[in-house]
């Protein structure tokens, strides 16, 4: 199984404003993310991302995709194809029959997966914006990872996608 982290970020490494606003992320970026998740057939998010993402109208596109929410708690999930896992490893175990798994944020969940050395590749879509404070791409865990650049492409005339391998 290949574990791929896919995120949109500001130029300065933030994934949401302090109030969880992600309206600065473009439709082109969403389409690229959505196509990646649909091709994999499954994705994993943290509990806070589950609460914000499932309220967005575009989420309807992904409503039939298998989704695992990582949380220390048990809580009410919204659909029979959504599942709860209590750790990153448990989430991957639940999805072991898929060839690819998409890790889709937020910052706390991303950091947990990286700190446990569970991520093989990263796709990062850089949005043409900087803001001063917000939620970081990786936050709450102390780790260092070296990366190898596998590719780069323009997803629009103002947005670039970087593709990295996480060296283990
Ligand atoms: N730009 C983008 O592409 C993008 C993508 C996704 C999300 N976002 C944004 O990111 C923000 C949310 O990020 P966030 O960092 O605040 O929260 P998050 O990572 O979505 O969720 C954090 C929660 O996930 C659970 N969790 C994380 N690691 C865990 C572990 N190792 N074991 C068990 N549970 C674990 C915990 O839930 P419990 O507290 O329930 O235990 C934790 O409080 C939102 O604003 C969202 O819109 C942006």
Image (cartoon, helix red, strand yellow):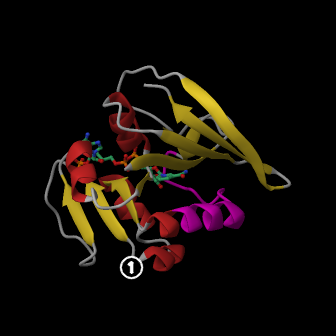
**Residue sitting at 55 percent across and 62 percent down?**
36
Image coords of residue 101 (percent x, y): 40, 55
In this rendering, the answer to whether 57 lies above or below 39 is below
In depth, the one of 140 and 165 nearer the eye is: 165
Quadrant housing the C terminus:
top left
Image coords of residue 124 (percent x, y): 61, 44
Image coords of residue 123 (percent x, y): 58, 46
Q: Identify the residue position indicated by label 1 in the image.
A: 64
| Residue 135 on the magenta span | no
Image coords of residue 12 (percent x, y): 65, 33
In which quadrant of the rendered view does residue 67 lie? bottom left
Local secondary structure at mark 1: loop
Q: Is residue 50 left or right of residue 123?
A: left
**Residue sitting at 55 percent across and 47 percent down?**
17
In depth, the one of 16 and 44 nearer the eye is: 44
**Residue sitting at 52 percent across and 21 percent down?**
146
Whether residue 130 can be seen here? no
Whether residue 52 can be seen here? yes
Total labels drawn:
1
Toward the right, the furthest residue is 157
**Residue sitting at 41 percent across and 77 percent down?**
63
Characterize the local packing of mark 1: few (<14), some (14-19) or many (20 or more) Cα atoms within 10 angstroms: some
Q: Is residue 18 left or right of residue 110?
A: right
| Residue 26 on the magenta span | yes
Which stretch appears magenta?
18-36
In this rendering, the answer to whether 29 lies above or below 154 is below
Q: Is residue 24 left or right of residue 42?
A: right
Q: Is residue 46 left or right of residue 150?
A: left
């Amino acid at each position: 199984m290949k574990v791929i982290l896919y995120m949109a970020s500001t130029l300065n490494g933030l994934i949401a404003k302090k109030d969880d606003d992600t309206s600065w992320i473009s439709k082109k970026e969403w389409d690229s993310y959505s196509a990646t998740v649909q091709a994999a057939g499954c994705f994993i998010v943290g509990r806070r991302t589950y609460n914000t993402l499932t309220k967005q109208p575009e989420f309807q596109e992904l409503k039939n995709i298998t989704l695992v929410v990582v949380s220390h708690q048990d809580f009410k999930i919204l659909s029979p194809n959504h599942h709860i896992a209590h750790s990153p490893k448990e989430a991957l175990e639940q999805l072991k029959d898929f060839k690819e798994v998409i890790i889709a944020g937020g910052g706390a969940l991303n950091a947990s997966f990286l700190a446990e050395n569970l991520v093989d590749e990263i796709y990062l879509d850089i949005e043409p914006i900087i803001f001063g404070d917000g939620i970081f791409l990786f936050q709450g865990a102390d780790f260092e990872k070296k990366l190898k650049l596998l590719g780069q492409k323009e997803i629009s005339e103002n947005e670039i996608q970087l593709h990295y391998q996480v060296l283990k």
